[in-house]
Image (cartoon, coloured by chain):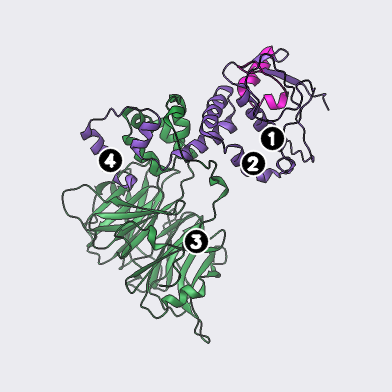
Chain colours: A purple, B green
């Protein structure tokens, strides 16, 4: 099955990932690099940690599979993981670093899912802690993966939508630069939104 | 009073709750890149966008910028809302957002003078309101709580007027028109671009005048036709905006036990809401019919659950109905109670909306009239 071209990516913390070209090209940034001729060497991604890159690859692999309408029972994306200089622990299970191909530890059901269940898969995918959410949107912006950007932006919007103005200022460390009069005026104009 | 259960709305696919946590700590988000705020902002519900206008000057300028608003309007899946005036509240209206099941109280205007006005018609994010004598007309945007007076129909001495509005193009930026129809069959049309009334005439079809217009049923605009509900002649009169030709369409006329029938538009479908009492078994029900546009025949689509109907039967109930893309919203008022019911046209689901979600003080108010309106962030009046 490995007649597909593989692309090698390197995260900021030195971890190496080998992915199919189609999966890598979900990122417009990587796609342009491939088109510019860097597809045959290791592509460094200094702005993305190994932990997040792993998640992103999981996302892209899933979506490529769904698009290609693959309905195999067990899709095994081949990922080669080599620890170059590694201290941090991979959150998911990687049995043997020396293994040539490692299965991504997802349950079969996820891969069996019909395309119409992709929304549920996405919802579960993005159900992560705040730090991961933050890193995902930043990384997907850097890597220019629209689908993941939209998904994480929506998730963040959902977290924010019922917050008060004071809470938002606190969360995002924003200084209120309105005078009390100015702020009162705006609040009055839109009083309905504050109920 | 009957079962006051709040039935949970089935969450549509687009709105799967993606994140089970709601805690946002400044340790994480304090360093959120500014250029990503817009991407997130585009996905906030419209009420949140308006609330965050007071966060800071930078946020205000981002959320009011033309580019942001255009992108928001394009991306937005804001469902149409309902706009109502409650009695005893000269200056207050209330808006209902079906997708979040929330009510918002909104100021009608900030004028100094005391105005008693009520909605006549709406198009896009604009609502047209008039005073009791139809001597003054206003257009307003409920989201910005702004109101502006338009030239009045001062030449007319009309006892009653209904109005229908339509956009010239795809958006309000291209302007809109409004047709006002009176009991005497007279009509005039207003052009928002020229800010003037430019065409007038009398209904030409051979029907006896005066008309008895259904003042509470909002006119609907579908495929180039305006439809108004009437008691006399029984049915609807329609106006073709291109040809200027009027027509009369019959509606089913069963015995009614609840005052008023309504025509509503649901995603291009023309529906009629009314009540009927079946002859033999005397089974009272609130029914929905749909007009088949080719044959101009009405087909019964659904009936409200009979337990709810029985609550209303013989109780001198008033009903108001409005419709939008997928939803028909019905208010029933009887014996000082409000019952709010929605019917999802595509899913064929009836839901009783809990009274407890009305804003404070609203539960006992009479909702005088209501119209559909499409909240739009780019609307200006």
Residue at horizontal 71%, vertical 12%? A41
Q: Mark 4 — residue?
A: A187
Assess whether mark 1 and mark 2 are in contact (beta carbons under 8 angstroms): yes
Q: Element under label 1?
A: helix
- Identify which residue, B53 or B171, lies in the foreground: B53
The reply to whether label 2 and label 3 mark residues of one chain is no
The reply to whether label 4 and label 3 mark residues of one chain is no
Residue stretch in magenta = A10-38
**If you read the primary sequence from the N terminus, does the residue marked by circle 2 or circle 4 appear first?**
2
When the figure is inspected, residue B268 is found, relative to residue B16, above or below; the finding is below
Q: Mark 3 — residue?
A: B7
Cα–Cα span, label 4 and label 3: 33 Å
The percent position of residue B59, horizontal first and vertical second, equals: 36, 30
**If you read the primary sequence from the N terminus, does the residue marked by circle 4 or circle 1 appear first?**
1
Cα–Cα span, label 3 and label 1: 35 Å
Which label number is shown at residue B362?
A: none
| Residue B322 figure quarter | bottom left
Which label number is shown at residue A121?
A: 2
How packed is label 3: few (under 14 Cα within 10 Å), some, or many (20 or more)?
A: few
Name the side, left or right, on which A49 lies relative to A79. Answer: left
Cα–Cα span, label 2 and label 1: 9 Å
- Identify which residue, B212 or B128, lies in the foreground: B128
The percent position of residue B62, horizontal first and vertical second, equals: 38, 30
Q: Is residue A27 magenta?
A: yes
The percent position of residue B143, horizontal first and vertical second, equals: 34, 45
| Residue A83 figure quarter | top right
Residue at horizontal 43%, vertical 58%? B220
The reply to whether label 4 and label 1 mark residues of one chain is yes
Q: Element under label 4?
A: helix
- Identify which residue, B204 or A133, lies in the foreground: A133
């Amino acid at each position: 099955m490995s007649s597909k071209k593989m692309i090698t990516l390197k995260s900021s913390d030195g971890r190496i990932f080998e992915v199919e070209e189609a999966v890598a090209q979900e990122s417009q940034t990587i796609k342009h690099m491939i088109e510019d001729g860097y597809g045959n060497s290791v592509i460094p991604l200094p702005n993305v940690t190994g932990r997040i890159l792993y998640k992103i690859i999981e996302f892209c692999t899933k979506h490529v599979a769904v698009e290609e309408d693959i309905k195999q029972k067990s899709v095994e994306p081949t990922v080669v993981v080599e620890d170059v200089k590694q201290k941090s622990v991979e959150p998911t299970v990687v049995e043997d670093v020396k293994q040539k191909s490692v299965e991504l530890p997802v349950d079969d059901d996820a891969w069996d899912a019909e395309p119409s269940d992709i929304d549920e898969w996405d919802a579960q995918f993005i159900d992560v802690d705040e730090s991961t959410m933050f890193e995902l949107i930043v990384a997907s912006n850097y890597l220019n993966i629209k689908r993941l950007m939209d998904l994480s932006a929506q998730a963040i919007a959902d977290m924010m939508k019922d917050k008060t103005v004071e809470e938002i200022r606190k969360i995002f460390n924003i200084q209120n630069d309105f005078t009390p009069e100015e702020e009162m005026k705006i609040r009055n104009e839109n009083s309905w939104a504050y109920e | 009073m009957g079962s006051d259960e709040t039935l949970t709305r089935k969450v549509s696919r687009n709105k799967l709750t993606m994140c089970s946590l709601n805690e946002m700590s400044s340790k994480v988000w304090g360093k959120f890149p500014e250029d990503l705020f817009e991407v997130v902002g585009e996905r906030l519900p419209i009420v949140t966008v308006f609330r965050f206008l007071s966060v800071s000057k930078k946020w205000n300028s981002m959320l009011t910028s033309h580019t942001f608003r255009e992108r928001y309007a394009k991306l937005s899946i804001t469902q149409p809302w309902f706009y109502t005036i409650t009695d005893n509240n000269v200056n207050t209206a209330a808006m209902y957002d079906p997708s979040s099941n929330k009510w918002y109280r909104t100021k009608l205007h900030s004028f100094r003078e005391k105005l008693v006005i009520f909605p006549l018609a709406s198009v896009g994010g604009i609502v047209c309101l008039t005073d009791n004598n139809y001597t003054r007309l206003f257009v307003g945007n409920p989201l910005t709580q702004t109101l502006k007076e338009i030239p009045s129909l001062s030449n007319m001495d009309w006892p009653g007027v209904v109005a229908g509005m339509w956009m010239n193009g795809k958006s309000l930026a291209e302007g809109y028109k409004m047709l006002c129809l009176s009991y005497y069959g007279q009509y005039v049309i207003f052009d928002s671009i020229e800010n003037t009334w430019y065409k007038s005439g009398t209904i030409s079809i051979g029907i006896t005048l005066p008309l008895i217009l259904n003042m509470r049923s909002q006119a609907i605009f579908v495929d180039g036709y305006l439809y108004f509900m009437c008691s006399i002649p029984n049915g609807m009169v329609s106006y073709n905006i291109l040809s200027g030709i009027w027509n009369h369409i019959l509606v089913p006329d069963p015995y009614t036990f609840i005052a008023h029938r309504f025509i509503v538009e649901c995603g291009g479908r023309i529906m009629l809401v009314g009540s009927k009492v079946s002859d033999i078994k005397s089974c009272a029900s609130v029914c929905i019919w749909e007009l088949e546009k080719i044959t101009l025949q009405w087909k019964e689509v659904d009936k409200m659950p009979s337990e709810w109907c029985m609550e209303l039967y013989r109780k001198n109930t008033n009903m108001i109905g409005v419709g939008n893309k997928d939803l028909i919203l019905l208010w029933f008022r009887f014996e000082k109670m409000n019952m709010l019911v929605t019917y999802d046209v595509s899913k064929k689901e009836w839901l009783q909306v809990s009274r407890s979600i009305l804003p404070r003080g609203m539960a006992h108010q009479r909702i005088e009239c209501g119209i559909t309106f499409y909240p739009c962030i780019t609307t200006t009046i």
